[in-house]
Amino acid sequence: MSTLEEIKSRLDAHIGETVTVVSQAGRKKYTKRSGILRSTFPSLFVVELDEEAQFKQASYSYADVLTKNVDVNFAE
């Protein structure tokens, strides 16, 4: 099993749960968004963002998680 498949299966187990996603937005700049993990697809996953966010949804690729450009944290 490849690492991308492991990331996808880990996220599949948390569909419908609250997540916080921290992504790189440039040199020394990060964006932090919270929402609900809605769905996973073969190469990306979708987070429905909180009401205060400017966008309704955001999508991230598993490759970004693998390369540590995106960090996903689950609510306990």
Image (cartoon, rainbow, N blue to C red):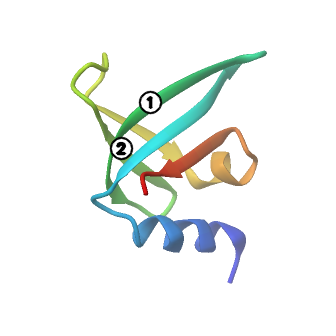
Say few, some or many: other residues with alpha carbon within 10 Å of mark 1 (under 14 / 14 to 19 / 20 or more). Answer: some
Tag in front: 1 or 2: 1
For residue 47, side relative to residue 63 (left or right):
left
- Residue at mark 1: 33
Horizontally, residue 48 falls left or right of residue 33, namely left
Q: Residue furthest bottom?
A: 1
Q: What secondary structure is marked by label 1?
A: strand
Q: Residue at x 70, y 70 (%)?
A: 3
Q: Are marks 1 and 2 in contact (CB under 8 Å)?
A: yes
- Mark 1–mark 2 Cα distance, whole angstroms, equals 9 Å
Q: Is residue 30 above or below residue 73?
A: above
The count of marks equals 2
- Residue 51, given in percent of the width and then of the height, sits at 21, 25
Viewer-side residue, 32 vs 43: 32
Dividing the image into 4 quarters, which one contains the N terminus?
A: bottom right
Give the labeled residue for mark 2.
47
Q: Relative to 66, is 40 on the left or the right?
A: left
Tell me the residue at 37%/47% (across/down).
46
Q: Residues within 10 Å of mark 2 (few under 14, many from 20)?
A: many
Indicate which disc, 1 or 2, sits on the residue closer to the N terminus. Answer: 1
Residue type indicated by callout 1: Arg
Residue 54 spot, x, y in % from top left: 31, 16
Task: Give the image location of residue 35, x and y in percent.
Answer: 33, 39
Q: Position of residue 24 (x, y in %)?
A: 66, 27
* Residue at 41% over, 61% down: 41
Looking at the image, residue 35 lies above or below residue 15: above
Where is residue 58, by image quadrant? top left
Q: Residue at x 44, y 30 (%)?
A: 33
Dot 2 amino acid type: Val
Q: Quadrant of the C terminus?
A: bottom left
